[in-house]
Image (tube, rainbow, N blue to C red):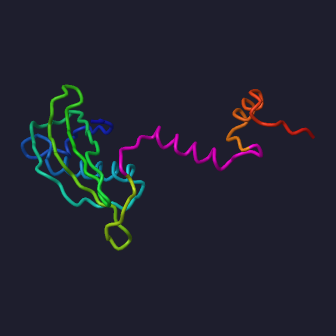
């Protein structure tokens, strides 16, 4: 589980009992789940379809810093399923768990559309993929992706050096 988002519980987030209002926490979760799905699926058009049982384990109070942890548990043709855990940043005490939230990729008419993803990707993966596609798009005359690779191949005698 990756914990990236943190929230500071402020007076406006509290219920009459002086603890974090569950509706506020669910709004934060829904927003974070949508952002996670948008990043993973590579589209800004996602909607929340389903949220399983919400298990409030403990409460948060004013001044607490909480962390939202989300990870993908499954990829469907048009959907992504996520699991969620919220915990206190300082004490690591679990506050809430949700076993499954399903978000669906949709078109402009809000009809489900395939997203083409099958696994979690991280920013490093995307940089590598992008670098790979840039290398293939910027080949030099010898078919080498970078000047460094071309120089190494010339030094190894793998390509002919053209004289001018």
* View extreme (bottom): residue: 109
Split into 4 quadrants, where in the image is the N terminus?
A: top left
Residue 31 in percent (x, y) is at 29, 52
Q: Residue furthest right?
A: 164
Q: Position of residue 38 (x, y in %)?
A: 37, 53
Most foreground residue, 19 or 151: 151
Residue 158 occupies quadrant: top right
- The front one of 156 and 30 is 156
Q: Using the image, determine if residue 106 lies above or below residue 140.
A: below
Question: In the rendered picture of this protein, how many numbered marks are placed on residues?
Answer: 0
Q: Quadrant of the C terminus?
A: top right
Q: Quadrant of residue 92?
A: top left
The reply, left or right, for residue 80 in relation to residue 96 is right
- Residue 74: x, y in percent? 27, 49
Residue in the picture at 23% in, 35% down: 66
Q: Which residues are magenta?
A: 118-142
The answer to whether residue 39 is magenta is no
């Amino acid at each position: 589980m990756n914990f990236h988002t943190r929230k500071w519980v402020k007076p406006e987030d509290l219920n009459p009992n002086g603890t974090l209002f569950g509706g506020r926490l669910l709004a934060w979760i829904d927003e974070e789940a949508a952002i996670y799905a948008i990043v993973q699926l590579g589209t800004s058009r996602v909607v929340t379809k389903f949220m399983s049982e919400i298990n409030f384990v403990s409460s948060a109070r004013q001044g607490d810093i909480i962390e939202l942890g989300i990870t993908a548990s499954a990829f469907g043709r048009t959907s992504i399923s996520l699991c969620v855990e919220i915990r206190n940043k300082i004490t690591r005490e679990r506050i809430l768990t949700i076993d499954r939230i399903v978000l669906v990729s949709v078109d402009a008419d809000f009809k489900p559309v395939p997203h083409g993803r099958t696994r979690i990707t991280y920013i490093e993966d995307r940089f590598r993929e992008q670098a790979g596609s840039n290398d293939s798009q910027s080949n030099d005359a010898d078919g080498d992706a970078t000047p460094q690779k071309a120089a190494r191949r010339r030094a190894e005698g793998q390509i002919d050096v053209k004289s001018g």
